[in-house]
Image (cartoon, grey):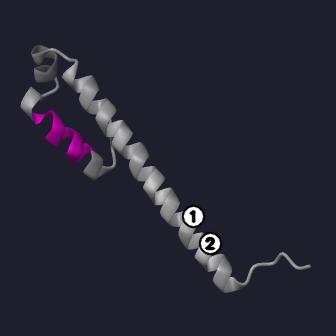
Amino acid sequence: MSHAYSTETGAQLDLVFSQMGQGFNAYLERRKAVGMVRELNALSDSELARRGLRRIDIVAHVAAQMGKGTLAC
């Protein structure tokens, strides 16, 4: 009995696992973003000011970092 997959079946499996991976990566990025928002929210207003941020700007700052692919405070 042969266990070899056809090229079409292999391509379909690749697509499924690729989509699963993309969803998982998005989940991990979202977790990082939420963690970053929480970390920044825990800072005092003066600590935020030293970083050039206001409390109201935290979510926008995190979103911008996500757009750049850099989630670092």
- Dot 1 amino acid type: Phe
Residue 49, image x and y in percent? 10, 22
Residue 20 in the figure: left or right of residue 60: right
Would residue 50 be counted in the magenta stretch? no
Asked if one can make out residue 54 in the rendered structure from this viewpoint, the answer is no
**SS under mark 1:** helix
Q: CA distance from mark 1 to mark 2?
A: 6 Å
Q: Residues within 10 Å of mark 1 (few under 14, many from 20)?
A: few
Residue 57, image x and y in percent? 10, 35
Residue 17, image x and y in percent? 57, 64
Asked if one can make out residue 22 in the rendered structure from this viewpoint, the answer is yes
Q: Compared to 60, does 19 lie above or below?
A: below
Residue 63 in the figure: left or right of residue 12: left
| Residue at image coords 43%, 44% | 28
Q: Residues within 10 Å of mark 2 (few under 14, many from 20)?
A: few
Outermost residue on the right side: it is 1
Towards the viewer: 55 or 23: 23
**Quarter holding residue 63:** top left
Q: Which residue is mark 1?
A: 17
**Quarter holding residue 48:** top left
- Dot 2 amino acid type: Leu
**SS under mark 2:** helix
Q: Main secondary structure of the magenta part?
A: helix
Q: Compared to 28, does 53 lie above or below?
A: above
Q: Which residue is mark 2?
A: 13
Report how many numbered discs are placed on residues in the image. 2
Magenta stretch bounds = 57-65
Residue 33, image x and y in percent? 31, 39
| Residue at image coords 75%, 79% | 5
Disc 1 + disc 2, Cβ < 8 Å: yes
Q: Which mark is residue 64?
A: none
